[in-house]
Amino acid sequence: MPADSSDWLQGLGDTRGAHAILLCLMLAVPCPSGRLRAADLLDLPFADLLQVEVAAAGKREAQIRDIPASVTILTREELARYGYATLEDLLRNVPGFFILDNTEERFIGNRGTVGGGVQFLVNGISQHPSRQKVLTVPQIARLNIPVESIDRIEVIRGPMSVIYGNNAFLGVVNIVTNSLDTAGPRLSASAGSRASGQAFARLGGRSRDGFLVLNAGGWRTDGLDATYADIMSSAQFATLEPEMHRDLDGDLWQRRASLDLSAGWRGLTADMRYSDMDYGIYAFTPAFDEGSGLRLKTLHAALGYEHRFSDTLGLRLVGIHSQETYDAYRLDFLVAGLDGSQKQHLRRWELELNLHWQPWERLDALFGYRWHRLDHLDNRPRVASLVMVDDASDAFHQQDIFTEIDYSLGEPLRLVGGARLTRLPAAYRFTRYRYLDETLIETELPVSDRNDDLRSDLEPGYSPTLLVKLKADYRRGPFTYAAYAHFVDAMETDWDFVTSPAQGVVERIGERVPGRWNLGLNLRWEPSATGVFAALNVSNLLDAEIRYPANELADFARGLIGPGRIVTATLGYAF
């Protein structure tokens, strides 16, 4: 479960370089030469492919060859070809990425580490929360984006911290959902295994001076159904009480809804995104009655303005407000008849100014300032008469100034450098009120009072040695046949520093999980760019056993068993 206020405020302090955010992409990200299709990319000569422009890498458009990082571009046409049912499925098949599951959270792994370090943007807007690791609420809210709403994805692997802050140390993922040049209004509905299904609708239009796009979607599934005997060690299983559930079937449902509104008019841009997720989780022990339920609501709103003073100088100003509510409204665990709850809330306010200056062709410079405020930070766990606590924190302010300069010495050589300066408060202040003994504890944590030396000779967990991604497709007439596969190598769990069997002895939380292949197939029928379309998708075609290694919350010694074969049929209409 999420850490208490003191834990996650220390997490805030650990992001000294800042967690920058935003935006320079801005809402409508045009594709080079109009509509950029997957087929276009495949047909481009290598030299021309390097000239494809990406916006997320530097908060301004830049050609792939000029970006000092690994770049992957996914277009709407490619997403339709392979028929990914969710954004999680899509990211599993992105080169260099892997995903782990502990029922409450989906951790995104990249470059040998998992969780934190990848900045997520939607239409250039960084998603809430905008902090690295030790989050008050799960990052899974970032994944509640219907695949049907995605027009284009830019994946930048490599340090982007100078312009985005520490939360982008491993890279940036920008998801564009408002490009009418890519896809217009459409409707679709799907149904599949494990009572899964989705519904999606897009409305939108554009004029000479502006555009308006509205995406709305919903998704549901009954979730995983593994038995505890298959994921626990024999010693763990022997400790279960007779009243506890013996499997996960029916305990890990998911219900998701999202609304995404984006508009622009003569340099002004507005963006609003709402996400509502209701899903079952595993909380430390098997459930007794209905299982543990969690509600996660997120709201983002942004207003921006872009102006070109001349061909060499441009300004972009963006204000953002976001808030998130984490409500574990039913914690059904530990012992029969003992129910609990936990509620957290957090608001974010941001203002960012970017100045883009290109005095001549070889020199390109970005200067930026960001003001950042977090308030209404509270945490309220309740477990019958055992735990009744209110944690609250003072508002947190942060300011950043940053710059990145790109200078070309000629066709084969470029120099790119930058710097970021962050101002943090002198200390974090928070209070804890215990209702049972009516005590109030006030604590002040100086920013400088932190242990930054986290070096260890222990081999880290959740770090697969090898990742393999494969794709192939073939089109004949109105039919597209596509196959995709990914391989994630074996993984160890992290180390257990809490329940060590003896002084100086440290063991892993659980067993090593084996590597696994996941093969998917997709058949799509699309007779024309507009009109009826249909698709049949099968993920985990071979019904391979997928295991996610144990962690502190879901400490299944043998690893949580992931989804088996899922068949999904989709029918839609493009206008």
Image (spheres, rainbow, N blue to C red):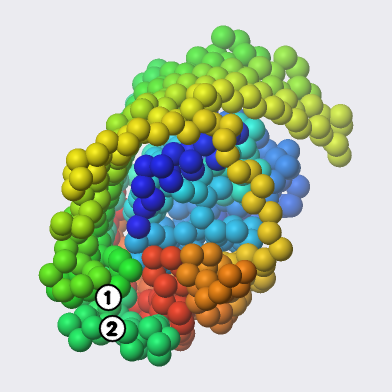
Front residue of 273/248: it is: 248
Q: Residue at x 37, y 42 (%)?
A: 5
Question: How far apart are labels 2 and 1 at the CA level?
Answer: 8 Å
Q: Are marks 2 and 1 in contact (CB under 8 Å)?
A: yes
Q: Residue at x 45, y 24 (%)?
A: 397
Residue type, mark 1 in image: Pro
- Taking 80 as reference, is 424 left or right? right
Q: Is residue 504 above or below residue 574?
A: below
Q: Is residue 435 above or below residue 416?
A: below
Expressed as whole percent of the image width and height from the top left, the position of residue 478 reads 41, 67
Dot 1: element: loop
Expressed as whole percent of the image width and height from the top left, the position of residue 309 reads 56, 9
Residue type, mark 2 in image: Leu
**Which mark, by number, is residue 240?**
2
Front residue of 469/239: it is: 239
Dot 2: element: loop
Residue bearing mark 1: 286
